[in-house]
Amino acid sequence: MGEQGSHRHYTFVLVHGAWHGGWCWADVADRLRAAGHRVFTPTCTGLGEREHLLSEEITLDTFIADVANVLSFEDLTDVVLVGHSFGGLAISGVADRMPERIRHLVYLDSLLVQPGQRPLDILPPEVARERTELAARSSGGLSLPAPPPAAFGVEEPDAAAWLLERLRPHPFGAYTSPLNIQAPLGNGLPCTYIACTEPAYTALQGVWNWVRTQSGWRWLELATGHDAMVTAPEALTTLLLELAEN
């Protein structure tokens, strides 16, 4: 688990990416809790066990509220706030609204957009076009069907089957709405970006390039696929505990 030095107990809020839900963090959450930490794994509206709430009204603001409300209602402070993939957008919004509750922002192979940008704006144009057409074709623009587990670097048969059973269409309004934040990305909080490099998720190349030019952001790499919480839970847990201590 890595050195825990002071043996302090930390609070982690783990936010999933597109098509996933809080369920995807099970292996990491179990390890963190076993080490004595508090862990929350909210599921964004319209996904996972909240799939029945899928609607055209869902935007990035909805996802930000989903996570911000956990911090607020559970009265969480000194939070290590982790956003995987699309979840990075939600944690950027929470950092803008309640920075005083956050200890460290961890972007796990995250999509990042600048204030006022839409997620579709920063994807490669052919990817954005393909996703828009797919959403229109599959659901009249309501949602985006999930790609196969292999797209997330999950090849092991049991893990792939587990994922396949739980992935759900992603509310497309979250892709077409802007990130409504006032402060610069990260809002001056300690920020770490963890890039998953084996295999790399190619749609994130532009994001990676941007992060590496940011002074004050820490860059780490994990030699696993995009869904690190599924493919490398032990290594990811160790990293999160080390970041909590810094």
Image: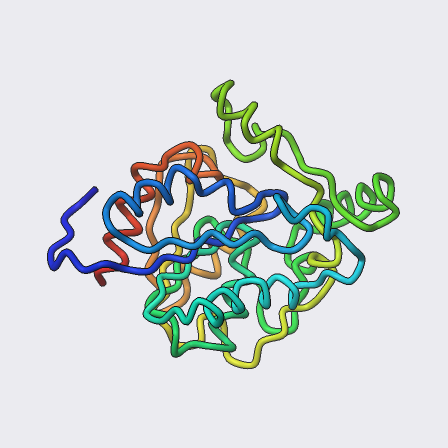
Quarter of the picture containing the C terminus is bottom left
- Quadrant position of residue 89: bottom right
Q: Residue at x 65, y 49 (%)?
A: 50
- Comparing 214 with 241, the one in front is 241
The image position of residue 2, as x and y in percent, is: 18, 45
Task: Locate residue 151 relative to residue 137 in the image: left or right.
Answer: left
- Quadrant position of residue 163: top right
Q: Classify 76 as above or below 175.
A: below
The image position of residue 243, as x and y in percent, is: 27, 57
The image position of residue 22, as x and y in percent, is: 52, 47
Q: Residue at x 41, y 71 (%)?
A: 75
- Comparing 203 with 51, the one in front is 51
The image position of residue 124, as x and y in percent, is: 66, 50
Task: Locate residue 126 relative to residue 229 in the image: left or right.
Answer: right
Quarter of the picture containing the N terminus is top left
Taking the view exactly as shown, the residue that stands out farthest to the bottom is: 182
Taking the view exactly as shown, the residue that stands out farthest to the left is: 5
- Comparing 158 with 122, the one in front is 158
Task: Locate residue 86 relative to residue 177 in the image: left or right.
Answer: left
Q: Residue at x 30, y 37 (%)?
A: 234
Q: Residue at x 61, y 29 (%)?
A: 164
Q: Classify 105 as above or below 240.
A: below
